Image: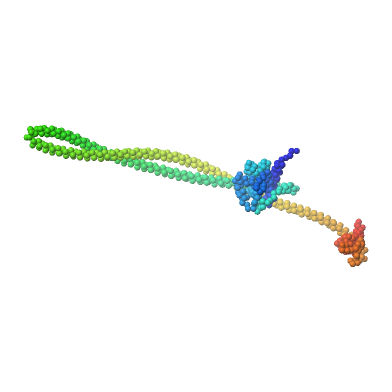
Amino acid sequence: MATKDPTAVERANLLNMAKLSIKGLIESALSFGRTLDSDYPPLQQFFVVMEHCLKHGLKVRKSFLSYNKTIWGPLELVEKLYPEAEEIGASVRDLPGLKTPLGRARAWLRLALMQKKMADYLRCLIIQRDLLSEFYEYHALMMEEEGTVIVGLLVGLNVIDANLCVKGEDLDSQVGVIDFSMYLKNEDDIGNKERNVQIAAILDQKNYVEELNRQLNSTVSCLHSRVDSLEKSNTKLIEELAIAKNNIIKLQEENHQLRSENKLILMKTQQHLEVTKVDVETELQTYKHSRQGLDEMYNEARKQLRDESQLRQDVENELAVQVSMKHEIELAMKLLEKDIHEKQDTLIGLRQQLEEVKAINIEMYQKMQGSEDSLQEKNEIIARLEEKTNKITVAMRQLEQRLQQAEKAQLEAEEEDKKYLQECQSKSDSLQKQISQKEKQLAQLETDLKIEKEWRQTLQEDLQKEKDSLSHLRNETQQIISLKKEFLNLQDENQQLKKIYHEKEQALQELGNKLSESKLKIEDIKEANKALQGLVWLKDKEATHCKLCEKEFSLSKRKHHCRNCGEIFCNACSDNELPLPSSPKPVRVCDSCHALLIQRCSSNLP
């Protein structure tokens, strides 16, 4: 025979105990028919078995003062793995009466059962075996397949409703001992199996109907939430459509404004250009006219200068001639003394002519200077006009560039407007498609809702009918249970009465026998009394020795009267008791009277 691994045997035993405790708890809770409290024995045993299962293979942690071996460490890991378990951990830590980690672990198990999430929490813990290896040995129940089986069995506990008071209980000092007597079958349990099976079937039907109702309520709430979300999304889409329409209208208005502004700018620029063109043309005409006048003046001045220069040359020539003539005259003075007066007159005339020529030259010089000043001024005016024309050309170029940029911007704006209009149209088309789809979905959902409402109404009616039938069945079961209890009570009373009757019959028979015997004895005693009527009751002072053993009376050996013969005897010789005719109760009789009376009674018997 191969020896089994003791840890495997321990795991198998704990698994079997867990199966029995969970099965017994579910069956008893279903038969109990209401929420369980902390005083319910199967529930207490379940927590004890779970504590043993969680303690199996737990590593011992050394501390400064003692060794620590508790299940609170692995249970604390559940908070990190399952965020919903943080509430349990916080509430367990906030409990005032708990001082030890074991007490906290027990409170945690009770709260997890009340939440109906013990299986979910422990499943998260069993999956992370790397983390569990810090707390458990490799052969522990939580590290092997038995742990997953127990977690699977714990799912069945979601049927149970428990209301456990954790604050008032002393969970630190409880001793967890498994009561095996709860799981051993009796003959009464075998007899009550059929009744429990019927009750369990009824309760299963009830739970099934309640679960169906819960599922229907959850589906209805989901559909309501879907309808609400669809309505919200529809309203949002309508709002977005309205916003998009408003944006389109605003953009169209802005486009119209921009177009009107562009038209105004074009009009203004055209007007400004026309004005500038007119000004430039007028300035050019004035410039041309002024230039023509200046050219004419210049030509005239040049002609005058030429004439004057010719005159001057002529004058100079004449002067030279005159000087030569003067020399000739001076040479010919002597010869021409007669013509001096004539020549003097000619000289005076010539001087006058010279003065006139000089005045003319001065005037011409002044005129030349004025013409030069006017030429400079005209040149300056021409330069200014050229600068103005350059500025006007630059402004014209800038205006043309601005016009080109404005036209480009207008074209770009028109293209962007076209693109935006196309996008808006595509968006509006897509939104209209989405709205039509949503409206179709809404119509489908409304039809589905109507169908589901009708289905729910029919289900509610069926539920009402089933509830009525259930209540009727419950009343019938209660009546049957009460009738069974009454029948069992009547059976018990009948059996008790039968027992009492048999006992009384036996007692009557025994009394009859005893009465017949007592009658015979009384007759014998009467006869013995008749024979002993002559006997006298002795006084205590007269008797000093026992009549039978003849021993002297003392403090240790006291005197006793025989109620039959009246003599005085010691205790050893008168320790018999018999009923006498004078007293129906048994009284003290001496040994000799006792023997005589018994002989008479035995002789009288058949």
- Position of residue 96 relative to residue 406, above or below, is below
Q: As drawn, is 204 to the left or to the right of 236? A: right
Q: As drawn, is 293 to the left or to the right of 150? A: left
Q: As drawn, is 347 to the left or to the right of 191? A: left
Query: x, y percentage for residue 267?
Result: 35, 42
Asked if residue 149 can be seen in this view, the reply is no
The image quadrant of residue 333 is top left
Q: In terms of depth relative to the viewer, which is nearer, 391 or 400?
A: 391
User: How many marks are shown on the rendered structure?
Assistant: 0
Q: In terms of depth relative to the viewer, which is nearer, 281 or 260?
A: 281
Q: As drawn, is 304 to the left or to the right of 561? A: left
Q: Residue at x 70, y 43 (%)?
A: 10
Look at the image and tell me in which quarter the N terminus lies: top right
Query: x, y percentage for residue 340?
Result: 8, 36
The image quadrant of residue 572 is bottom right
Q: In terms of depth relative to the viewer, which is nearer, 455 or 542?
A: 542
Query: x, y percentage for residue 111?
Result: 64, 49
Asked if residue 10 can be seen in this view, the reply is yes
Look at the image and tell me in which quarter the C terminus lies: bottom right
Q: Residue at x 62, y 48 (%)?
A: 89
| Colour mapping used in the image | rainbow
Query: x, y percentage for residue 318?
Result: 14, 34
